[in-house]
Amino acid sequence: LLVTISTGAAHDLTTRPVHTQWRIASDLRDAGVQSGESAAVLGHSTAGDYWAHLAQIRIVADMPLQDLDMFWQANQQTQKQVIDAFAGTGARFIITPKRPMMAGWIPVGDYYALDLRDRP
């Protein structure tokens, strides 16, 4: 019994799972996001509230997760209008859980981010 418990404990200590929300927050910080900055979310669910809290940023605009596919299926002009509207909220970046087919998005954990300051 002692060997089984010790083996299990050793395995748990050496193979810690990566906390997805912490990874997103950490990657955002590595990308230069500062505490107090604002974000917009394409495909918002309650999960976004955790990484935003960990990164100490505010979510100022969002699109519900159930509308995300409709956004990505829209034409480029419509997508640009939505992104422009999110930029108009003062958000520094947009984050989404679905891999964008547009240039400029960087991976942050299991999500993707677009720095709105880098847009033309």
Image (cartoon, rainbow, N blue to C red):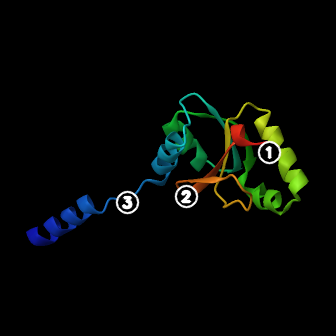
Q: Specify which label sits upstream in the sequence, 3 or 2.
A: 3
Label 1: state its secondary structure. Answer: helix
Q: Position of residue 42 (x, y in %)?
A: 72, 50
Q: Residue at x 70, y 37 (%)?
A: 117
Q: Which residue is tagged 1?
A: 83
Q: CA distance from mark 3 to mark 2?
A: 14 Å
- Compare marks 2 and 1 and give the one earlier in the sequence: 1
Q: Foreground: 18 or 4?
A: 18
Residue pictured at 71% horizontal, 40% vertical? 116
Q: How many marks?
A: 3
Q: Are marks 3 and 1 in contact (CB under 8 Å)?
A: no
Q: Which mark is residue 17?
A: 3
Residue 10 visible, this angle: yes
- Residue on which the image places disc 2: 110
Relative depth, front residue between 51 and 35: 35
Residue 67 image-quadrant placement: bottom right
Apparent side of residue 26 relative to residue 76 in the rendered image (left or right) = left
